[in-house]
Amino acid sequence: MNNLTINGSHTEEDVYTTSPAYIQITRGIFDRLPKFKLPFPLHASYDDTLKPVFGSRASDRLTREQYEVLSRMCSQGMLFLSRRDIEAYKDLLVENLDLAVGDPCLSGLERADILSRGITAKAGAFLDQPSPATLEAVHAGVLALTGCLHADRAAINPFFQLDGDQGLPWHGFKTMIFGLAAFQKIYEGRQGRRHLDDLALGLLLHDAGMTRIPGFVVKKPTSLQILEFEKVKRHPAMGVEILRAAGIQSVDTLNCVAQHHERLDGSGYPQRCKSGEITVLGRIAAVADSLAAMTTDRPHAKARGLAECLHELARDRRRYDNTGAKALLVFVLTELS
């Protein structure tokens, strides 16, 4: 995952001439801070200069009176954070994704990094312990992301600059970004927000059933035996069971999970569905899942370039939906180049 660090010293005039040097602490942010121990140094504006406030050292603990003074300063627009402490600020926003969405001081890449870290953490918690409570947290994170995309379709672009690990949560997140980009390119805003929300959740959790597959099978560096592959082929259906048990009822969301390994020629699994039986979102999920796998190092294959993989998927019209693959290829070549 990208961790952005902004280096360099700043003069007091930077606050007013190049505002990105400091981030204003809004009331929404201040109210989420620990009450008596600040997670990062704060600065207050006095007569057009910035000075550190009390409680800014890691060892400091605020008194109730000091906290109330800071609260009043915040209400008056006087509290700021230096961008030299951006990483600690991002850590706070990872736990408060709704605030990251509306923060005008963040760059698109910073916001993407925060959302990816927060959503993958929530997805990981759900995959470890599926329940209505962990699902609610995942859903809130997804809505924060789709809210950004619904307001500005170009907000998805910085997500393509991020990188992650080989774990299931990151694979789900990567699949979600690819699928949402394809969906946006195909429909150009003609579909409602609900379709975006349902697709995002289904793509993020499409591999939930893999948590029920033995680890030695999932991580095997060589080709699977017939019986091992039969186990793997059950994971889409098991994923649907997991999501339904947690309270998901959306047909669109469940189709992403059920159909992401189906292929147009009937060679996929688990139902061996053919072209007319696979839904539009199921087709998008198939392209996005395959692309996420192809562009990630795996036990049996090295990661390949995004454009190269998309060209291959677009040519494979027998198995993959050409509309989704070409839409994503056009997006990558025109909007990310």
Image (cartoon, rainbow, N blue to C red):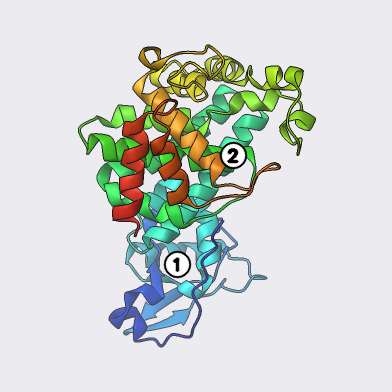
Q: Position of residue 62 (x, y in %)?
A: 58, 65
Q: Would you call the spot at circle 2 few (<14 residues within 10 Å), some (14-19), or many (20 or more)?
A: many
Q: Position of residue 321 (x, y in %)?
A: 37, 28
Disc tally is 2
The secondary structure type at the circle numbered 1 is: helix
Of residues 164 and 319, the one drawn nearer to the viewer in this rendering:
319
Describe residue 90's horizontal placement relative to residue 111 as left or right.
right
Q: Amino acid at mark 2?
A: Pro
Query: Which badge, 2 or 1, comes first in the chain's sequence?
Result: 1
Relative vertical location of residue 257 with respect to residue 52 in this rendering, above or below:
above
Of residues 308 and 285, the one drawn nearer to the viewer in this rendering:
308
The secondary structure type at the circle numbered 2 is: helix
Q: Position of residue 36 (x, y in %)?
A: 58, 60
Relative vertical location of residue 203 with respect to residue 262 in this rendering, above or below:
below
Q: Amino acid at mark 1?
A: Val
Q: Position of residue 134 (x, y in %)?
A: 57, 30
Identify the image quadrant of the C terminus: bottom left
Q: From the image, tell me which residue sits under label 2.
A: 169
Q: From the image, tell me which residue sits under label 1.
A: 69
- Residue drawn at the location 46% of the way across and 72% of the way down: 83
Mark on residue 31?
A: none
- Residue drawn at the location 36% of the way across and 57% of the way down: 103
- Residue drawn at the location 38% of the way across and 63% of the way down: 107
Describe residue 144's horizontal placement relative to residue 208 as left or right.
left
